[in-house]
Image (tube, helix red, strand yellow):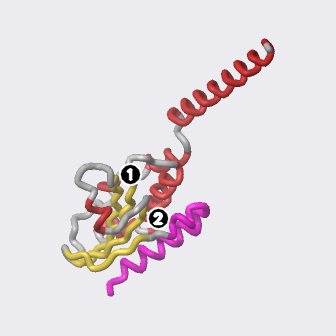
Amino acid sequence: MKSKRIIVAVLLGFVTASVVFAIVKETTKDTPLEQAVAEVPAAEETSSAADVSPHKVILYYFHGNARCPTCMKFESYSREVVKTGFQNELEGGRLKFRIVNVDEPGNAHYVEDYRLYTKSLVLVEMKGDEQVRWSNLDRIWDLVGSKEAFVRYVQDGVTEYLQEK
């Protein structure tokens, strides 16, 4: 009976130590994904030109306070798309990339505006101050496992929206 208690105590100690180790490791590490996200400018910095173009496209990444590794991939991959594939459009003011936390005060209206129910990438076409159209790039959930497919999908959407109709 005594050996059974010792084994249970050792196993509980091991489980507790493992959980503490995992928590500490997750909260202190700087993963390559986190480094990549940190290297790209914040949303407000991704467009350096004044809003001079009458035809603009805004790519929104909407998230909440809770951020999982998949959510971080959405943001990282999306930043990469706009930074590497649309630098001229960003600098010229034709494309903007905005990261919006819908849980922050004042941002809740986006949930209704774009019928959001989870983390989302939304393309919005603007002509002047008027929103012409928008679409939720909802296939990102299916494509997040393949960076190449994800990037191609978002690039295609942005390219299509940048073409004036």
Is residue 142 within the magenta segment? yes
Residue at coordinates 48% horizontally, 76% vertically from top-left? 156
User: Do the residues under discs 2 and 1 have CB atoms within 8 angstroms?
Assistant: no
What residue is disc 2 on?
81
How would you classify the magenta stretch by its main secondary structure? helix
Q: Is residue 6 above or below residue 107?
A: above
Cα–Cα span, label 2 and label 1 = 21 Å
Q: Which residues are magenta?
A: 139-165
As drawn, which residue projects farthest toward the left? Answer: 129
User: Where residue 99 sits in the image (x, y, percent)?
Assistant: 35, 56
Q: Residues within 10 Å of mark 2 (few under 14, many from 20)?
A: some
Image mark for residue 43: none
Is residue 164 within the magenta segment? yes
What amino acid does circle 2 point to? Val
22 sits left or right of 6 in the view = left
Q: Nearer the viewer, mark 2 or mark 1?
A: 1
What amino acid does circle 1 point to? Gly
Residue at coordinates 42% horizontally, 65% vertically from top-left? 121
Under circle 1, the secondary element is: loop
User: Where residue 129 sits in the image (x, y, percent)?
Assistant: 19, 73
94 sits left or right of 153 in the view = left
Under circle 2, the secondary element is: helix
Q: Earlier in the sequence, mark 2 or mark 1?
A: 1
Q: Is residue 107 above or below residue 32?
A: below
User: Where residue 134 sits in the image (x, y, percent)?
Assistant: 34, 75
The residue nearer to you, when weighing 79 against 99, is: 99
Quarter assignment of residue 115: bottom left
What residue is disc 1 on?
64
119 sits left or right of 109 in the view = right
